[in-house]
Image: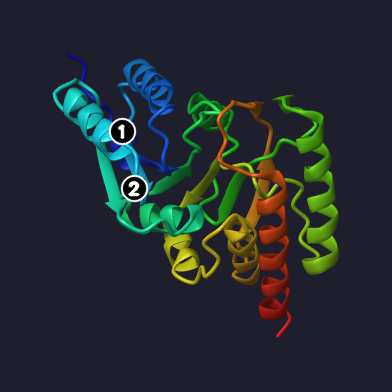
Amino acid sequence: MKKIKKSFKKDRTSIIIPLYNEELRLDYCFNIVEKFLKNNKRFFFEIIFVDDGSTDQSKNKILKFINKNKNKNFNTKIKLISYTMNVGKGYAIKKGILTSKSKWILTCDLDMSVLPEQYLTWKKRKFIKDTNCAYIASRSHYNSKIKSKFIRRRLGGILKLILFNFFSLKVSDTQCGFKVFHSSYIKKIFNKIRCYDYAFDVEAMLLMNKNNIKIIELPVSWVHRPGSKVHLIKDSVKFFLDLLILKRRFSR
């Protein structure tokens, strides 16, 4: 067996995957994660599933997955954080970040619309190097490859205009779940997060701007997967109301 370079161990990355009632889509996620770990054994990872109060069999399926992989030769620890109340995706991400033990932290949606290999591609191309930056996958980047419904792209354009007019936030895609942070600042940022629904991404970026953390948008390969829990009308209304609350807070 080849020795693992110390640099890889020092550069360990936590991958945080939030979920709520995802028992039907977990098997696909497990297959992607297992393949990723098998093909990248020289790297050290910490996989953190955060179950945001699921009422189905999600928790049990994840525990079985952890047990299945605990004796495999992966340089990885797979963990589960779970709690009984469904609070929101933002809270799940916050719990995962505050629990993580790595220098780099990747948040990743369970549907694997962006495959975890994208992170290593960014690293290989030296896109990720400055520890005082946040690196976010942007479906609006001119080099991104996107397979999505037209209505979602239109909503993304509308959101971009709202965020610029409300906050002068010059970020074209706040809502893609694939983001990379460094532990030197991100725990401090998420300790201040109050939005636990979908507007938490916007709040996090506003806090980063306030703390002089540079936000860099990177190209991504993104595919829309069926089975999303997002309700376009209902969640869009709730999202807009949360933006109004954030506008009041950050205008003080």
Q: Residue at x 40, y 54 (%)?
A: 97
Residue 218, image quadrant: top right
Q: Which residue is mark 1?
A: 44
State left or right for residue 153 relative to residue 207: right
Q: Are marks 1 and 2 in contact (CB under 8 Å)?
A: yes
State left or right for residue 135 relative to residue 248: left
Figure coloring: rainbow
Residue 242, image quadrant: bottom right
Q: Residue furthest bottom?
A: 252
Q: Residue at x 65, y 30 (%)?
A: 220
The spot of residue 143 in percent (x, y) is: 76, 27
The spot of residue 160 in percent (x, y) is: 80, 51
Q: Residue at x 57, y 31 (%)?
A: 122
Quadrant including the N terminus: top left
Give the crowd class for mark 2: few <14, some 14-19, many >=20 residues within 10 Å: many
**Front-lying residue, 59 or 67:** 59
- Amino acid type of disc 1? Phe
Q: Which residue is mark 2?
A: 102
- Amino acid type of disc 2? Ser
State left or right for residue 89 relative to residue 61: right
Does residue 12 appear anywhere in the picture? no
Q: Is residue 204 above or below residue 222?
A: below
SS assignment at label 2:
loop
The spot of residue 31 in percent (x, y) is: 38, 18
